[in-house]
Image (tube, grey):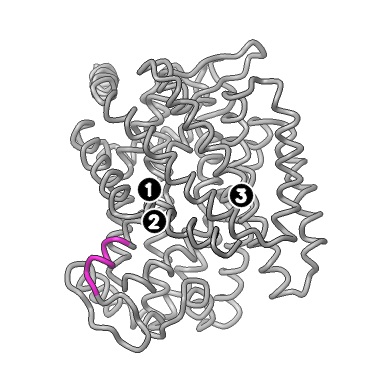
Amino acid sequence: MEVVLNVLDKISSFVWGWPLIILLFGTHIFLTIKTGFIQRYIFYAIKLSFSKENTEKGEISHFGALATALAATIGTGNIVGVSTAIALGGPGAVLWMWFTGIFGIATKYSEALLSVRYRIQAEDGSFAGGPMYVLEKGLNMKWLGILFAIFTAVAAFGIGNMVQANSIAEMTANNFGISKYLTGIFLSVITFVVIIGGVRGIARICEGLVPFMALFYVLGCLIILALNYDRLPDAAIVILKGAFSPLAATGGFAGSVLKDTIRYGIARGLFSNESGLGSAPIVAAAARTEEPVKQALVSSTGTFWDTVIICLITGFTVVSSGDWISGKSGAELTTSAFSHIRIIGPLVLNVGLLTFVFSTIIGWSYYGEKAAEYLLGSRVKSYYRILWVLSVFLGSVLSLPVVWTFADIANGLMAIPNLLALLLLSRIIKEETRSYFTKIRG
């Protein structure tokens, strides 16, 4: 098993290495240009997030689709992932992570646009969409759509389910002495209650949970930063300098090479906001809308909130603590950075992680379900949900590093067919965008 794990670790490092990073970030820049810098409409998009669409075409509201996508996207990557990037690439990685958010807005917009355009309505009235349908209907590449669906289904049970459940179980056991079995049972029950209602039930919970968890975490971090206000100028200087010039190793700091700063900053940013991976557009297809561009704009705000705001605030919190030179790993660095402010720091960290991780479980349940439905038909829904709940329990009580690493590989491989569709259909993205803004300008 150890040999298998070592092989999978090497494959995972390759999949999430420079080729995928260049492809993803390059696509971000290409689509930014192709859409005429769609990022300039971000505040208009935020306003659209709370608007109501008077149409029957769809299952959930604009905000419901966004909240569900954010539930799946905002997770440990926004906290521990940021610390990991800093630990391996230095403070400058924060800026490169932020760049992935800025340019990734265009990619998140583009994949949502195509997902709504090529979505289908099933006999039961539900909607389905995502890269698998884009590949099949837009490019006549069903075989590639099948591959994407397989990668999504595998990734869902790993990074979207079992690894998240295990994170909660480990945290509650270490911090509160609660049995992993009790945590597993509790998580399984509340997960079942949420997902049994399908996307409408998931969206209903996410509409309340996501704003609470994001606001609680952001406000908590801002309080910590306010208490450390005298350190912020130095933290900003270190981040800016470290992003463009290699920093000498200090203490146990490992990020002494500039390419590591760029690599880990971009890689962790991409992993955090999922722009280009093809996951978020699956739920965008369920939104009530007649206009693909509208939901695409709303979906693009997910990357803005996830990386441009939350990851940046986490980065400043960690860097301003000064612990990045201690040689601690991602999880240890996170705990150490937040522990400087007694009571508030640990509370913000623990509540943030618990809510972020649980929201990922319910958000990814929908992604995996739609992938399974694409592969096996709508009859698989009930069986899938039961299997999902059982996996939550297993993830809570077992340590399955091989499963998690394999799922991490599948998560990275999701990007390849999705990016192919984005690049080959970029003309349609450009035309839809131009047509929409010409129409609203009247």
Q: Which residue lies furthest to the top in this view?
A: 123
- Seen at 44% across and 39% down, the residue is 414
Q: In this view, does 371 lie above or below 390?
A: above
What residue is shown with label 2?
A: 309
Query: What secondary structure characterizes most of the magenta part?
Result: helix
Q: Which of marks 2 and 3 is in front?
A: 3
> Which SS class for mark 1?
helix
Q: In this view, does 159 lie to the left or right of 325?
A: right
Label pair 1/2, CB-CB below 8 angstroms: yes
Badge 3 density bin: few <14, some 14–19, many ≥20, Cα 10 Å: many
- Pinpoint residue 137: horizontal percent, then vertical percent: 42, 15
The disc labelled 2 sits on which kind of residue? Ile
- Pinpoint residue 263: horizontal percent, then vertical percent: 29, 60
- Seen at 43% across and 46% down, the residue is 412
Q: Does the stretch in magenta take in 348?
A: no
What residue is shown with label 1?
A: 304
What residue is shown with label 3?
A: 359
